[in-house]
Image (tube, rainbow, N blue to C red):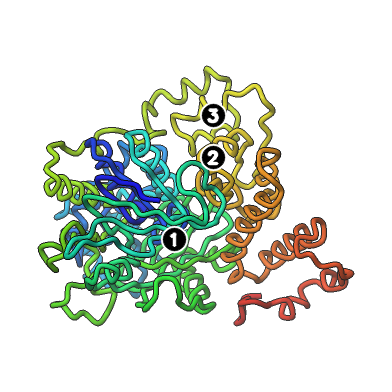
Amino acid sequence: MATTTDVLVIGGGSTGTGIARDLAMRGVDVTLVEQGNLTHGTTGRMHGLLHSGGRYAVADQASATECIEENRVLRDIAGHCVEMTGGLFVKRPEDSAEYFEEKLRGCRECGIPAEVLSGPEAREVEPYLAKDVDRAIQVPDGAVDPFRLVVANAVSAVDHGARIESHAEVVGLLTDGDRVTGARVKHTSGPGKREHGVPGTTEDIEAEYVVNATGAWSGQVGEMAGVDVEVRPSKGVMVVMNVRQVDTVVNRCKPKGDADIVVPHETTAILGTTDEEVSDPEDYPEEQWEVDHMIDELSKLVPILADARTVRSFWGVRPLYEPPETGTADPTDITRDFFLLDHDERDGIDGFATVVGGKFTTYRMMAEDVADHVCDVLGVRASCATADEPLPGSENLDRLDEAMADFGLRSPVARRSKQRLGSRAPDVLDTDDPNPVLCECEAVTRAEVRDAIDQAGTELNGVRIRTRASMGNCQGGFCCHRLANELHPEYDAGTVDQSLTELWDERWKGHRHALWGEQLSQAMLNQLLHATTWNRDGDDEDVDWDAFARGPAAEDEARTDGGPGGDRT
């Protein structure tokens, strides 16, 4: 099968969907392909920080200035994806006073609002800060939901005529001499394929121009065209806590280092991160010591974290780009700026460009620069409107409370739904059908789940990123089966079972490094629910109930499949 498009975008993260939206809004025919679900790569594995720019105000002031500019833009166009928590750069007694002053001066030079707070004033803002924190710089950091933002960009792109294909793996680039003319795409057999690509088939997508927006995978796609993209993937770990121990982004005010930020995100707090170069963005070690290091170091800023429950951990890979002439050895020294590589100009390969580097906060600005370049090549005369037109769900948010009240939607559950759905909340929640809560941890209702199924098909991981169902304290133990039940009777039992298994596997992947204390008990309860009540493991043997009755003394014995060691008991 062969199809044609003006521009083929490879990569369904924030940058790729941002490019697709921008080009589609300019009237360009766009197709986007993503090898997994949207946000499969780096975007879906970030700590959710909406940068004020303060993090880069000393080492990279150009990036800091871009961050504060895009911070303001995203507040306007993506309000239902953003929570303006504020941020604190806190100084402990052993931290450099000179660096504190340098950070403050850098923020002000970059136009970042910054106010100095004493230790007591900082603890008034964030009561769980360590008692020996002596000063802090207050900045307009925030939290952003990357899943919601990417889906909103994809929906907007489709609304403007784009084609978005997930589970569509590029297995080769189409070429004609020294020109890239498209890509060969294999539509994989994962659930959720409903409109375009048929699972198990291969499609040749011919395009006037191809944009490689695959982030840490850019080098692999570049090789298909015979060009070298010097991307240096750098992994970092994030640890998710059971509740929001802080309501403000807390940064350690010191030069570059690991374990220096806590981000309040939805119902949780996310600890981050490390910075270690890896050779393969898909295959790298996930080690228990990294999780322990996050908790140990960040407990110095927020002591309550030492005794808090950890519900999961995950690793992401940054797509750092190092121009060949720099030769930087330390990945923390590589600029967080982005680069647009025109392979015609650089390598003599026409019709092909790669975008690498950058940060989530500046995705829209990066997409605008790429779209400007593509339109210039194609001779399209249209300007960017993505900084002015709100994303779907963020239109008229100032009138949303009034609209919710008109529909009688005032409950706490409805308020959580409003946060996720934004301006779409009245349309989704105003139903005459029963609308029970299917995910108690995140207060996700049946109406939201069915709305997400309309978008994602049978792919329950797609439903998850749209609703946060299964992302709470029980990590799907009490709600996975309820989500799967909503696929019945439209889909057959085999399809539903496959989708449930994939959702459950994704949940397990994240909490296998958190199996100590209360979280170990939660995992054991989930095992009981899934394996014994439903026989999900297909085991016909009798269950050894004594294994679950021995209490905490059995914890060491129960630590298997990557469970923690050390003193996490």
Q: Amino acid at mark 3?
A: Val
Label ID, residue 452: 2
Outermost residue on the front side: it is 1
Q: Earlier in the sequence, mark 2 or mark 3?
A: 3
| Viewer-proximal residue among 486 and 112 | 486
Which circle's residue, 1 or 3, is located before the other in the chain? 1
Which of the 4 image quadrants contains residue 55? bottom left
Identify the residue at horizontal 29%, vertical 44% (top origin).
30
Q: Amino acid at mark 1?
A: Arg
Label disc, if present, on residue 428 of the rendered structure: 3
Q: Where's residue 511, x and y in %?
A: 60, 65
CA neighbours of label 3 inside 10 A, class few (<14), some (14 to 19), many (20+): some
Label 3 residue SS: helix
Residue drawn 20% across the image and 67% down it: 59
Residue 430, percent across and down? 57, 23
Q: Is residue 52 above or below residue 173?
A: above
Counting residues from the start of the chain, the first of labels 1 and 2 encountered is: 1
Q: Looking at the image, can residue 177 be seen? A: yes
301 is higher (above) or lower (below) than 190: below
Q: Is residue 432 above or below residue 304?
A: above
475 to the left or right of 298: right
What residue is pinned by disc 1? 45
Q: CA distance from mark 2 to mark 3?
A: 10 Å
Q: Secondary structure at mark 1?
A: helix
Cα–Cα span, label 1 and label 3: 28 Å
- Which numbered dot is residue 216? none
